[in-house]
Image (cartoon, grey):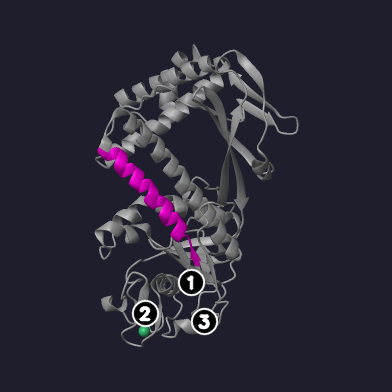
Amino acid sequence: MKPNEHPSWTEPDIPEKDIIIIRERRLPALADGGIARSSFLKIVVDIRSYYVYYMNMQLTRTIKIKLNIPIEIIKPTVEVYTKAFNHVCRVGWDDSDSNGVSLHNKTYFHTREYLPSQLAVSARMKATEAIKGVKARIKKKQKATCPQTKQSSIRYDARSYNVWFDRNELSLLTTEGRIKVPVSVPEYFKQYLNWKRCSAELFIRKSKVFLNIVFSKDITDLELTGKVVGIDRGIKKIAVTSENQFFGGGKIKKVSKRYEKIRNALQSCGSKSAKRHLQKISKKENRFRTNVNHVITKHIIGTIDSGTVIALEKLTGIRQNARLHKKQRKELHKWNFFQFEQFLTYKAESRGMEIKYVDARFTSQKCSGCGYISRSNRQSQSFFKCKHCGFSLNADLNASRNIRQNYLDAICYPSSGLVNNRIVGNEVTKTIGNCATT
Ligand SMILES: [Zn+2]
């Protein structure tokens, strides 16, 4: 993505000088013994020949509120909004047109007949995005059809909704004009109320009406302290940090196994009620995993200081690790590592940490003590012993230290053979596992 295509792109305010200096990347000074070389990289930019850009990092949070209104009040609006969305999509698809202005000119008169103008514009914008989405799929030679939906969610913006949290009131635009709706915000979400309020999405699920409100906050330059923590994600433990901490394990595995047993039994039964039961169980299992991912990422972030860089392996690396047994690969695939990563990222960002990805190669085969790489270094799934220097360690912990070192190598910190001089002690200081039920 080019910088000016980034959603948080801001038009630069260029000073009236020919040459300006922007700080691009700060090279962290190692907090634990490394030598600081230069505190930041200076780049001289001549604005006569270059574009200067900067990107604001933005945190966003979505809060979901259940609206206590009978569905009949909002349903007619949802129906015509859906009609408008489908209509614009049809026109865009037939004309192969994904240009917002052109689609507006082609459809506004039609959709305006049954929708208030702000909602007609909003439906067109939503449809334009959908058309752009399918166009991108076609470009990648993937399957694509004209986007059509039975029930669209309504996107509200500043001109079509308003909310007053101090008096618990919400105003929404409908086909019958503006309606006032009482709202109550769950206690946990109140921390976001002083953020900038953005768009909102109204939708109906199981005859109940919900509103997702998006809040955002700009974060300025991260103040990095130079500390780096590597995290290895795996099968035996969901996460192990280079700070000797282990997350997830025994109990979580047990529960997963129990679900698997039930699932297998139901699958082999195959009756109609078994299928229904299976669906229920899968949903329950998903909730269990989501919860575990939330609990573990929260624990991890709680143990790391703000200003730290968290180094992770690239996800494709662990999925394609051919050295795992077939059964283990299956287990790994089942755990939602993508979700884990998302949770970790948003929690880290809001606490002033940065997530960086490193190459996953050799992290499990390399000795974090001397750097010697050999397949036979890893004696079992959980035990690592170096053939060269005899250094031995829990295999996942060894991997997390390698991930940390890989990041340091990538930002050009010298890879000394004495990595472990920086991480003192081999014993495990704290284990946080079995936290599935907290
Ligand atoms: Zn070694």
Q: CA distance from mark 3 to mark 1?
A: 11 Å
- In the image, what residue type sits under mark 3? Gly
At which x and y percent is residue 260?
35, 47
State yes or no: residue 28 in magenta: no
Q: CA distance from mark 3 to mark 2?
A: 15 Å
Residues at discs 3 and 1 in contact (Cβ within 8 Å): no
Mark 2: secondary structure: loop
Q: Measured along the vertical axis of the image, is residue 283 above or below residue 222?
A: above
Q: Is mark 2 within 8 Å of ligand 1?
A: yes
- In the image, what residue type sits under mark 2? Cys
The residue that label 1 is drawn on is 242
Mark 1: secondary structure: loop
Residues at discs 3 and 2 in contact (Cβ within 8 Å): no
Within 10 Å of disc 1 (Cα), the crowding (few <14, some 14-19, many 20+) is many
Q: Is residue 251 visible?
A: yes
Q: Is residue 171 left or right of residue 391?
A: right
Q: Main secondary structure of the magenta part?
A: helix
Residue 367: numbered disc = 2
At which x and y percent is residue 205?
49, 26
Q: Is mark 3 within 8 Å of ligand 1?
A: no
Which tag is nearer the camera, tag 3 or tag 2? 3
Quarter of the view holding residue 140: top left
Q: Which of 166/242 is in front?
A: 242
The residue that label 3 is drawn on is 425
Closer to the N terminus: mark 3 or mark 2?
A: 2
Residues shaded magenta: 246-268
